[in-house]
Image: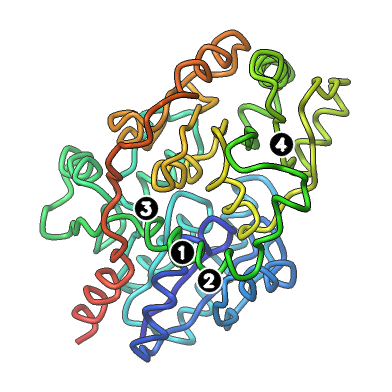
């Protein structure tokens, strides 16, 4: 039996190819949703939109401090794993859910598979970096998305026979979910009165950016400079927490920037695919834009996705308004002919195949 543990929407997206492959091959598996960011009831729509089966278990952990979240999840996950006794536990990425899932399983002597292993920003101030490192070092099977991720693991002393370069499930997910999006959300550009390739799309939600007034103001001021220079609408779906910070800090909505409610993943994916350029602080969006052949400007000083920099789909600019504008100037006319470094879209099937061999 395969246990799939997830707790945030990016994890659902990246695990969707693994779930679909388990379903296709009629594997004995179950999904445990920790509810790290949302209650499972809110995420049911997300499962439905992506045409995925419901989670068998949900912990409804909710937000809290890192210790509160991880502690609650450890207790809840352990109870489920003791009851179900799976042969392998799969976790994906770098959240508190991932660390709690891997730790709970490892302490029970269960096999742990880490999907998207070996990513490193080399910035220990990021909670995600700590989660990645600890999860990698207590996992039995490390599904590295690229050879660069494999190199990171080998340098940290992890044995080579534990590492499998599978490609990144985000490639599978983008193409599988884009087909669903084209069926279910095709009218999103019309709804927002946007033309393909004639708008910028923004995501900025990371704690280190939105919780600090100076950094958040730098991003907003940078977006205004971008609008004034290029005169394309700047669309920014804002998380409620970010909106709260904008109001608390008394910041003004910049000219030309449209702040809108958060979108469903399918709608967002279509907006990404049709954007002139995307500005983001999200790791997943850096990957998605690279795969979709859309230029990306990253509002951070580092990235755990260096492959995007190497192929030329992405540039790091931080949060200085002038640097944001310069980054957009550099990327806006970028030829969209870079090679996708994240694999061939068959990562999900490879991961399930390796997991089957472990169980056999």
Q: Hey, which quadrant is residue 156 in on the image?
A: top left
Q: In terms of sequence position, does the residue under pointer 2 or pointer 3 come before the other? A: 2
Q: Which residue is mark 2?
A: 77
Q: Position of residue 39 (x, y in %)?
A: 72, 66
Q: In terms of sequence position, does the residue under pointer 4 or pointer 3 come before the other? A: 3
338 sits left or right of 61 in the view: left
Q: Bin the neighbour count of mark 3 within 10 Å (Cα to Cα): few under 14, some 14-19, many 20 and up.
A: many
Q: In terms of sequence position, does the residue under pointer 4 or pointer 2 come before the other? A: 2
Rendered residue at 24%/47% (across/down) = 146
Evaluate if marks 4 and 3 touch, with contact meaning CB atoms under 8 Å apart: no
Q: Farthest residue toward the front?
A: 195
Mark 4 or mark 3: which is in front? 4
Q: Farthest residue toward the top?
A: 322
Mark 4 or mark 2: which is in front? 4
Q: Which residue is mark 3?
A: 135
Numbered disc 1: secondary structure: helix
Rendered residue at 46%/42% (across/down) = 289
Q: Which residue is mark 4?
A: 236
Q: Position of residue 356 (x, y in %)?
A: 24, 81
**In which quadrant will I find the C terminus?**
bottom left
Q: Which residue is mark 1?
A: 101
């Amino acid at each position: 039996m395969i246990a799939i543990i997830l707790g945030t929407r990016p994890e659902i997206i990246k695990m969707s190819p693994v779930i679909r492959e388990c379903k296709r091959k009629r594997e004995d598996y179950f999904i445990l949703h920790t509810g790290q960011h949302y209650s499972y009831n809110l995420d049911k729509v997300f499962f439905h939109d992506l045409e995925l089966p419901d989670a068998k278990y949900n912990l409804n952990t909710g937000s809290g401090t890192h210790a509160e979240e991880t502690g609650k999840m450890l207790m809840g996950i352990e109870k489920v794993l003791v009851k179900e006794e799976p042969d392998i536990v799969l976790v994906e990425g770098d959240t508190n859910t991932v660390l709690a899932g891997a730790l709970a399983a490892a302490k029970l002597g269960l096999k742990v598979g880490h999907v998207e292993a070996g990513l490193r920003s080399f910035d220990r101030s990021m909670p995600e970096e700590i989660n990645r490192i600890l999860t990698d070092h207590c996992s039995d099977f490390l599904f590295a998305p690229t050879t660069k991720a494999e190199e990171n693991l080998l340098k940290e002393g992890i044995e080579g026979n534990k590492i499998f370069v599978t490609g990144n499930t985000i490639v599978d997910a983008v193409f599988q979910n884009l087909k669903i999006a084209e069926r279910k959300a095709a009218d999103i550009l019309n709804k927002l009165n946007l033309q393909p390739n004639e708008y910028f799309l923004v995501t900025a939600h990371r704690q280190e950016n939105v919780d600090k007034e100076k950094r958040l103001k730098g991003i907003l001021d940078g977006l205004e400079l971008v609008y004034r220079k290029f005169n394309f609408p700047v669309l920014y779906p804002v998380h409620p927490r970010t909106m709260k910070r904008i109001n608390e800090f008394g910041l003004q909505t910049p000219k030309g920037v449209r702040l809108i409610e958060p979108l469903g993943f399918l709608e967002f994916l279509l907006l990404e695919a049709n954007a002139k350029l995307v500005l983001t602080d999200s790791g997943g969006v850096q990957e998605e834009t690279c795969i979709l052949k859309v230029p990306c400007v990253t509002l951070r000083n580092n990235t755990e996705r260096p492959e995007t920099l190497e192929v030329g789909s992405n540039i790091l600019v931080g949060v200085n308004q002038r640097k944001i504008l310069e980054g957009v100037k550099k990327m806006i006319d970028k030829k969209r002919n870079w090679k996708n470094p994240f694999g061939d879209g068959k990562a999900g099937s490879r991961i399930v195949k390796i997991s089957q061999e472990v169980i056999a």
